Image (cartoon, rainbow, N blue to C red):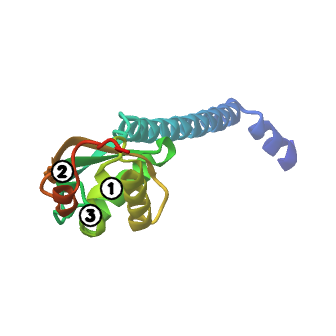
Amino acid sequence: MTEEQDLQADDKSPDTDKSKKKTGLMSRLLHFVKHNWIAAFIFVLVLIHAGLFAAWKLNSGGPPPPTEHTLGEFSFEGAPLPGNPVSHAEFRLHISLLDGARYRGVQLLAQRRHKLQQEIEELLRQAHGADFEDPTLAELKRQIQAIVNRTLGEHVVNEVIITDLNLERVAAASPLETPDAAQATPWREANSG
């Protein structure tokens, strides 16, 4: 036999077939491990994303902040003049936030609470007793709503709510105490003639 035939015979020997099988087995094993690692890696990524999503939902999916917020107790002191029927008023002031602005409104209220209180107190120092004559206090509420929205820098207020309103009215002078009442007669005289 020639050397080439010897080499070919050696290649066909049982030892060579075993090495090919080992190489084939190793490659299949490595191939299997590689695919499982990729699957395991993808599975771990999916678990991480699911965990982060669940944590986000639990933190943000809680009950939304309340719609109504108390701004505090306020009072009004008016001059006891005949044109001012109310000389003193005390009340609790609340606001109702728009549904779409709840989270932002709560955040802004926390940031600007003291500035807001100052602005409302300034409004009440400029108010008149007649502002409290309207049973619904519509004009006063409108002004407060405008101040709150302006102070917060965004339109977040849906409604202004006033509770626990206590009014002290100026005592009305009796008709006999006025200077014109002393000269006028309380009855109508018939014309004689």
Residue occupying image coordinates x 12% and y 56%: 177
The quarter of the rendered structure image containing the N terminus is: top right
- Cβ–Cβ below 8 Å for labels 2 and 1? no
Q: Which residue is mark 3?
A: 124
Quickly name the residue at label 1: 131
In front: mark 2 or mark 3?
2
Image height of 98 relative to 184, above or below: above
Q: Which residue is mark 2?
A: 175
Quarter-of-image position of residue 104: bottom left
Circle 1: residue type: Asp
Mark 3 burial class by Cα count in 10 Å: few <14, some 14-19, many 20+ = some
**Residue 161, horizontal then vertical, whole percent:** 33, 43
- Amino acid type at circle 2 is Pro
Per the model, the C-alpha gap separating discs 3 and 1 is 10 Å
- Give 142 or 45, whichever is nearer the viewer: 142
SS state under label 3: helix
Pair 3/1: label in front? 1
Q: Quadrant of residue 82?
A: bottom left
x then y, percent, for residue 73: 17, 52
